[in-house]
Image: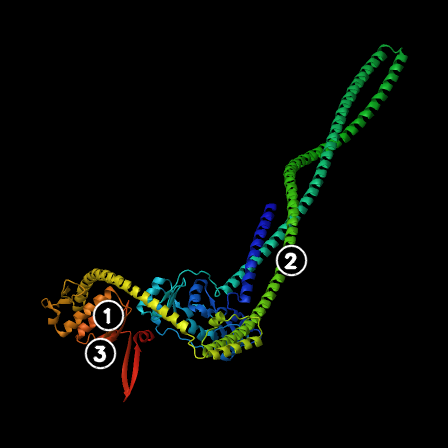
Amino acid sequence: MIAERRQIQEQMDQKREKYHRVRSNYETMRNMAERYDGYGFGIKKVMEQQAVTSGIIGAVADIIKVEEKYETAIETALGGSIQNIVTDTQKTAKKMIEYLKKNRYGRVTFLPLDAVKGKEFARKEILLEPGVIGAANQLVIYDEVYKDLFASLLGQILVVKDMDAGIKIANKYHHSVRIVTLDGDSLNRGGAMSGGAFKNKSNLLGRSREVEELKKKLDRWTKAITEDEEKYHENEKKLKEYQQNMIDLEKEMQEISLELNTQQMSQSAIKRRKEELDNRHEQLSIQRQQLEEELRNAEDDADRLQDEQVDLESANEQDEERIKEISELLEHLRKHAEQHAMEVSKVHMQLSKESQKLEFQENNQERVRSEIEHLSEEVQENQKDTGSINENVKALKQQIGHLKESCEAMERKIIEDQNRHQKMQEEVKEKEVLYKDILKEREEMLERISGYDKEMYRLESQRENRKGKKKELLDYMWENYEITYHQAKQRIDLDETQSLTKVKETISELKNKIKNLGPVNINAVEDYKEVSERYEFMQKQHEDIVTAEAHLTGLMEELEDAMRRQFNAKFKDIKRVFQEVFVELFGGGEARLELTDDDVLESGIRIIAQPPGKKLQNMMQLSGGEKALTAISLLFAIQNLKPSPFCLLDEIEAALDDSNVTRFAKYLHKLTKDTQFIVITHRRGTMMAADVLYGITMQEKGISTQVSVNLIENDLDE
């Protein structure tokens, strides 16, 4: 029981430690949620107005719940929208925007419920693609009133298991759908991809879930500690009952010992009484035997004396005295015999009584013997019980000692815990006071910063005004005196300590001196300096040009050598790919490219082609359609080797028949993986392979109208 009590105490200590750790985490997370940590300054200021301004519903992250496995994907899908604030109407949003402007609290995006409209996927088969988990708005939990809001934010975003599944779906639907993975990677419309590791994850979306989980965990620990305390008190109650039972058992043992001693004393008295009765019986038996012997002797003497009396009477009557004496003796003997007979009778009576007593004593002795045997058995059992009880008593005394020590240690532990708890409460109070002081200082700092911003704005305005005045003065100096501020400062030793009146007098004197000088070319020195600098500059430019000419000549030779090497290498690649593309577009045949001159930089290119079913001949001998398809083969071969990001084709397939147009369009669509093509065409096969069609029509005479059709979006919507 003591071990169980100690185990419960250890469990309680461990659970209390975990409880305080969970409580600390819970308080931290709850305070972060209440203070909107991680949100922008403007958002915090708006949420402070929620209590006094009706219509502010809350941040997007506060009105949805998401399973933990989808949090990263949904947070990526929402992006910055997770901090947007939801309002009931546009009027409330306008009011809060004016509040932000008035107090210069920054910018915030609002989502009025009466204005936001959403759109979901029209084609449901995209949700059945392998690896698709679902549309983002289907994976979050929210109130039905926010259905349009989350359809707008998440309705057209697809959540998939991993990047591989996302890439397959994006390629299949021509990058027309935004996709996010469970790891937070994103594939955007148009082909852009983003992903990697999160350096600092705000986890605004999972904050409320973490607070709820910590609250549940806190409740579980509280319940567990309460149950352990109940077990502890119950164990303590059982221990007290056990101690009381021990006391009762000790009393009962004392009573049993006393009764045992009494029985032992009674048994000894019975044994002594039995011994006394046995001795008395033995004495009476001896005495009876003696009396019987004396009686027989007396009878024998009486018979002998009677015989002698008869003999004497018959033989000698003379001796009367002798007879008298003998008679007296006989009388005496008779009396003595009677007395002895009486005594014998008394002895017999006494013997009978003693026999009865003896029989009673024997019966009583037998009963006592059985009782003694029974008591002996009980004594033996009691001795056994006494041994086990003594052992139990010793063990219980040891347990009681341990329990007392544990109770004392527990009391000391409780006192220490109470002291530590009191210290922690004092520390918490001090930290709360410190936190309030910090918040107060923070508010004061914000007020000071706001004041500094206003002062900085005022000083900035003053600086701009002074800059404007300075510019006006500099312009005035240049317009009137054709001199800059630095030139004037170098020419005039101006004492900045002079008064404005003195400066004006100096200016007046200088003006008079200038008038007295008359028409003088005051810029002669500057003109000479400028011309000299120009000459030196041109001289240096000439030298640089001569040096550059020699360098460029050598560079051109190096470039020509490099161009020849690169041209030969690329020409071989183009010849090889041209042969492959030609065979694919014509469905067979043979084609090659040849140079017309040994100097590759001056040489032309000859195309030798052999369409299926024809002989090998120069391209100029082919039909118009064959020429066009051969030229297209060469163009596509170059495009395969070095894809351009953008390419414009103007009716290059006009001369082809329908089957060749189909092959052309199919091959062109294969190249759209790396290149965006704009094709001007009138051919139906090419139009059918396009993603988007643009056309010009004239619905009214003299008025042209542009018409566009997005074939991919139409396919998705269907």
Q: Viewed as shown, does residue 232 lie left or right of 288?
A: left
Q: Are the residues at dot 3 and dot 2 in contact (C-beta closer than 8 Å)? A: no
Residue 165 at x, y percent in the picture = 34, 63
Q: Give residue 251's mark.
A: none
The quadrant of the picture occupied by the C terminus is: bottom left
Q: Quadrant of residue 121?
A: bottom left
Tell me the element at label 3: loop
Kind of residue at disc 3: His
Q: CA distance from mark 3 to mark 2?
A: 86 Å
Dot 1 corresponds to which residue?
668
Q: Give residue 426's mark.
A: 2
Q: In the orientation shown, which residue stands out farthest toward the bottom?
A: 701
Tell me if residue 305 can be seen: yes
Which residue is painted at 24% across and 62% down in the image?
553
Q: Residues within 10 Å of mark 1 (few under 14, many from 20)?
A: some
Q: Viewed as shown, does residue 258 lie left or right of 149?
A: right
Q: Residues within 10 Å of mark 2 (few under 14, many from 20)?
A: few
Above/below status of 37 relative to 255: below
Which residue is painted at 22% across and 72% down in the image?
665
Q: CA distance from mark 1 to mark 2?
A: 78 Å
Q: Are the residues at dot 1 and dot 3 in contact (C-beta closer than 8 Å)? A: no
Tell me the element at label 2: helix
In the image, 289 versus 444, the foreground residue is: 444
